[in-house]
Amino acid sequence: MKKWILLSVLFVAIIMGILVNVYLNAIEPVNAAENKAVEIAAKETNLSDFTDFNLYSGEETYYVLTGKNAKQEDVYVWINEKNGELITRNAKNGITKKEALNKLYQEKNPDEIIAVRLGMARIQKTDRPAWEIYYRKNSGTINYYYVDFETGEKLRAIDNL
């Protein structure tokens, strides 16, 4: 009986070790991208205290960081993964996540908001900082809604995916 208990504990420990290893290998590319983005932003801007990082994959991949300027104000930085080009905007000079959601609710009737994140919308071959809202309608369809970060205007919508 003791042998079965020991073998069961050993089996569970091995499975847990494998799962931890898979998880660590899965997040390694994201951690590497974050380290690269922080390094670029620290070198190219006068920002510090990077508090948030997201990967945005649209027409091109962008690293999106939140940092602080000398006045301790939140600043967003979009870094193009391919060419390293930076776009920097003060958070106070753009619309908030809540304001972007309000814009969506004025026009659409989403059933479930899945994610709201800063990204980049390509409009007439120009990339513009935007809030990307990923939501679901009652029909089960997936939809995207893009709101310009600076003006709050709707840039585009992708419906019924």
Image (cartoon, grey):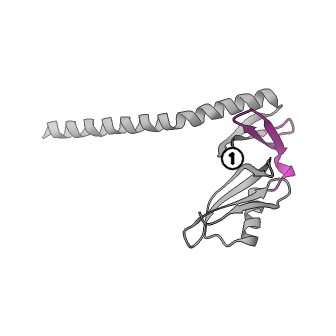
Q: Residue at x 77, y 40 (%)?
A: 77
Q: Residues within 10 Å of mark 1 (few under 14, many from 20)?
A: few
Query: Residue 67's x, y, as percent?
Result: 76, 39
Give the number of marks.
1
Q: Residue at x 67, y 73 (%)?
A: 109
Answer left or right for 93 relative to 121: right
Above or below 82: residue 145? below
Query: Residue 70's x, y, as percent?
Result: 86, 35
> Does residue 110 appear in this view?
yes
Question: Foreground: 105 or 141?
Answer: 141
Magenta-drawn stretch contains 69: yes
Under mark 1, the amino acid is: Glu
Magenta-drawn stretch contains 140: no
Asked where in the image residue 8 lies, by quadrant, the reply is top left
> Does residue 73 appear in this view?
no
Task: Give the residue at the far left of this rendering.
Answer: 1
Magenta part of the chain: 68-95
Q: Residue at x 79, y 36 (%)?
A: 86
Asked where in the image residue 61 lies, by quadrant, the reply is top right
Q: Secondary structure at mark 1?
A: loop
| The C terminus, quarter of image | bottom right
Above or below 96: residue 59? above
Above or below 100: residue 46? above
Residue where numbered disc 1 is placed: 59
Asked where in the image residue 1 lies, by quadrant, the reply is top left
Question: Foreground: 61 or 68?
Answer: 61
Query: Residue 91's x, y, as percent?
Result: 81, 48
Query: Residue 106's x, y, as percent?
Result: 76, 71
